C-alpha cells in the first residue's frame, strides 16, 4: 500500500461560503473525507500548510511547500498538493525547479467548484491526483480533469469550465480514467539524488508590451528590479520606431539586469532572428524564452537570480532546458547569412 502525504494549501477546492464570498476554509482532514478510499488502496496522511486563495500565493509560499516535501520525502511514496487554480501553474513550475532529482511523484490539483458543493469537479480531480500520486514515477505534475501535465507546462486557460488547464507546447504525460493511467510518455529517471534548491529572488517584473508602451517605464524598472521579462509581439518584436524601446533595454542590460524576451503568443514560441524588429533587440545580451510559458518563465528567472548575480550565467540557466520546460535549445544565434 502506497503512503501518500496530502499537503493542503487552500484554494477553491477547500473553499466555503464567507461573508464576502468564497474563501478557503476546509482542513486537510475535511478533504480526506471525500476520498473514495474503498476504490483505491492508499494510506493517506493529511497536513494543512495554509488556507490561502491562490491569488495570495507568493514565492515564499512556494518555498514553504518545497520544504514540506523535502522534510517528509523519505517517509512517503508520493505527494498530493491541493491548490487554488489561479496560480497553480506558477507553483507547479516553481516546484519543478526547486525540487531537484525527484524520483517520486509530486502532484498538484484543485477544482473550479468547492468540494463541498453538490455539483463539483473536485472529487474527480482529487481521486485522479491521488491515483497518479501512487505511480512509480518521478517529477512534478498537474492532474486536472483527467489530464496529467508536466509541471512546467500547465497553463490555466478557462475560468469556469472543468477542463481548465492545458499542456502548452508539450504533450500530456497521461490520462487518468477511473483506476487506470494511460501514458503518452514518461519523464526520464533523475540523474542526481533528491535535493532542494529554494533560493529565490522575487525582484522580477513582467511587462506586457502594447502599442504605445512608454520607454520611460524602464527607468523605474532599472532602479527596482534585478530581472525584467518583456512579453513582446509575435516572434519577438520590440518597437524601435516612434516610442523606441531599444535604448532603454540596452540601459538595462548595461546595468547588469537580466532582460528576458518572451512572446504574448501562447503557442509555438518565438524566433528573434526572423524579423528586423527581433534582430534589433537580439544584438543585446538578452535572454530568450523559446517556447516556455509565462508560468514557468517567472519562477525560473527568480530561481536563476537566486543562484547568481552574473547575467551571463543567468542567461545560461534560463536557456538550458530543465524539467521539460523547453522543447529544444532555444538559445539561438544569428543566422549564417546575416
Image (cartoon, grey):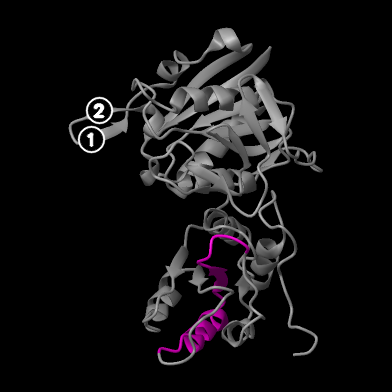
Q: Is residue 266 magenta?
A: yes
For the record, the magenta segment spans 243-268
> Which quarter of the rendering shows the C terminus?
bottom right
Q: Is residue 154 above or below residue 23?
A: below
Please, which residue is most extreme toward the top here?
Answer: 38
| Residue marked by disc 1 | 21
> In this rendering, would 201 be left or right of 106?
left
- Residue lying at 45% horizontally and 89% vertically, measured from the top left: 244
Comparing 140 with 184, the one in front is 184
Q: Nearest the camera: 52 or 162?
A: 162
Give the residue displayed 71% in from the left and 57% down from the top. 327
Q: Residue at x 48, y 85 (%)?
A: 239
Q: Is residue 46 visible?
A: yes
Can residue 94 be seen from the camera position used here?
no
Query: x, y percentage for residue 13?
Result: 40, 29
Label 1 element class: strand
Find residue 141 and report its horizontal and vertical position in percent: 62, 38
Q: Which residue is mark 2?
A: 17
| Image quadrant where residue 10 sits | top left
In-image side of 25 versus 306 (left or right): left
Contact (Cβ within 8 Å) of mark 1 with mark 2: yes
**x and y percentages locating residue 22 in the rendered image:** 27, 33
Amino acid at each position: 500500500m502506497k503512503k501518500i502525504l496530502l499537503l493542503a494549501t487552500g484554494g477553491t477546492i477547500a473553499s466555503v461560503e464567507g461573508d464576502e464570498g468564497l474563501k478557503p476554509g476546509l482542513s486537510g482532514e475535511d478533504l480526506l473525507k471525500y476520498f473514495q478510499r474503498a476504490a483505491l488502496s492508499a494510506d493517506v496522511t493529511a497536513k494543512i500548510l495554509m488556507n490561502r486563495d491562490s491569488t495570495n500565493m507568493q514565492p515564499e509560499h512556494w518555498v514553504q511547500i518545497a520544504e514540506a516535501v523535502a522534510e517528509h520525502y523519505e517517509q512517503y511514496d508520493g505527494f498530493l498538493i491541493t491548490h487554488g487554480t489561479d496560480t497553480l501553474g506558477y507553483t507547479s513550475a516553481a516546484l519543478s525547479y526547486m525540487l531537484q532529482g525527484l524520483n517520486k511523484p509530486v502532484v498538484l490539483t484543485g477544482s473550479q467548484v468547492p468540494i463541498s458543493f453538490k455539483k463539483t469537479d473536485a472529487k474527480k480531480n482529487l481521486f485522479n491526483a491521488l491515483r497518479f500520486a501512487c505511480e512509480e514515477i518521478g517529477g512534478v505534475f498537474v492532474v486536472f480533469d483527467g489530464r496529467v501535465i508536466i509541471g512546467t507546462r500547465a497553463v490555466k486557460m478557462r475560468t469556469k469550465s472543468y477542463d481548465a488547464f492545458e499542456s502548452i507546447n508539450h504533450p500530456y504525460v497521461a490520462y487518468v480514467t477511473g483506476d487506470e493511467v494511460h501514458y503518452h510518455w514518461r519523464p526520464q529517471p533523475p540523474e542526481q539524488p533528491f535535493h532542494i534548491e529554494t533560493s529565490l529572488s522575487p525582484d522580477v517584473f513582467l511587462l506586457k508590451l502594447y502599442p504605445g508602451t512608454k520607454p520611460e517605464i524602464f527607468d523605474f524598472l532599472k532602479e527596482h528590479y534585478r530581472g525584467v521579462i518583456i512579453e513582446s509581439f509575435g516572434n519577438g518584436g520590440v518597437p524601435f520606431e516612434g516610442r523606441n524601446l531599444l535604448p532603454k533595454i540596452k540601459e538595462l542590460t548595461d546595468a547588469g539586469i537580466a532582460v528576458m524576451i518572451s512572446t504574448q503568443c501562447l503557442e509555438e514560441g518565438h524566433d528573434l532572428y526572423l524579423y528586423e524588429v527581433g534582430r534589433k533587440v537580439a544584438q543585446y545580451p538578452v535572454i530568450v524564452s523559446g517556447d516556455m510559458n509565462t508560468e514557468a518563465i517567472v519562477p525560473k528567472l527568480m530561481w536563476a537570480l537566486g543562484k547568481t548575480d552574473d547575467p551571463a550565467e543567468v542567461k545560461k540557466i534560463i536557456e538550458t532546458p530543465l524539467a521539460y520546460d523547453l522543447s529544444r535549445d532555444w538559445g539561438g544565434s544569428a543566422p549564417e547569412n546575416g
